[in-house]
Image (cartoon, rainbow, N blue to C red):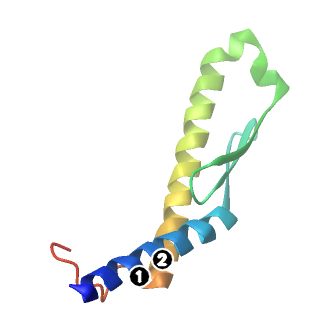
């Protein structure tokens, strides 16, 4: 039983370490060079830059489309960064967790 508690503590420590490392990772996404976004590895948006021409009311649909595309790209890139970091930590291998 104490071995399982130790394994869970190790897993919690690894998760904390991963979160700290991902906070230092940044990914950039853009849409047609008119919308730029920077996100960290924990999927926190750090900055958004929108070209003034996109703020025209006639461009509302393009602005919405661009924000969605840019956000989706940033999320995908941050997920890939997280996956690489998890592989670097060895994932969950060796934890001997039931059902995993």
> Compared with residue 24, is residue 33 higher up or lower down, i.e. above or below?
above
Question: What residue is at 56 percent from the left and 38 percent from the top?
Answer: 69
> Which SS class for mark 1?
helix
> Compared with residue 39, is residue 89 higher up or lower down, i.e. above or below?
below
Residue 89, numbered label: none
CB atoms of marks 2 and 1 within 8 Å: yes
The mark tally for this picture is: 2
Task: Give the position of the N terminus as an image quadrant.
Answer: bottom left
- In the foreground, 20 or 52: 20
The picture quadrant where one finds residue 94 is bottom left
Q: Is residue 87 left or right of residue 56?
A: left
Task: Give the position of the C terminus as an image quadrant.
Answer: bottom left
Residue linked to disc 1 = 10
How much space separates mark 2 and mark 1, taking CA atoms? 5 Å
Local packing at callout 2 (Cα closer than 10 Å; few below 14, some 14-19, many 20+) is few
- In the foreground, 18 or 87: 18
Furthest toward the front, the residue is 2
- In the foreground, 85 or 63: 85
At which x and y percent is residue 7?
33, 83
> Compared with residue 37, is residue 5 higher up or lower down, i.e. above or below?
below
At which x and y percent is residue 33?
75, 41
At which x and y percent is residue 49?
78, 37
At which x and y percent is residue 32?
70, 39
Question: What residue is at 75 percent from the left and 23 percent from the top?
Answer: 54
> Which SS class for mark 2?
helix
Q: Is residue 92 left or right of residue 61?
A: left
Q: Is residue 2 left or right of residue 73?
A: left
The picture quadrant where one finds residue 26 is bottom right
Question: What residue is at 55 percent from the left and 34 percent from the top?
Answer: 68
Furthest toward the left, the residue is 99
Residue 13, numbered label: 2
């Amino acid at each position: 039983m104490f071995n399982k508690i130790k394994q869970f503590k190790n897993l919690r420590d690894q998760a904390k370490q991963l979160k700290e490392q991902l906070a230092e990772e940044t990914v950039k996404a853009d849409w047609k060079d008119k919308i730029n976004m920077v996100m960290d590895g924990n999927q926190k948006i750090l900055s958004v830059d929108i070209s003034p021409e996109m703020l025209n009311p006639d461009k509302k649909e393009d602005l919405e489309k661009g924000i969605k595309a840019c956000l989706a790209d940033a999320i995908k890139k941050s997920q890939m960064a997280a996956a690489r970091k998890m592989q670097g930590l060895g994932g969950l291998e060796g934890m001997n967790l039931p059902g995993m």
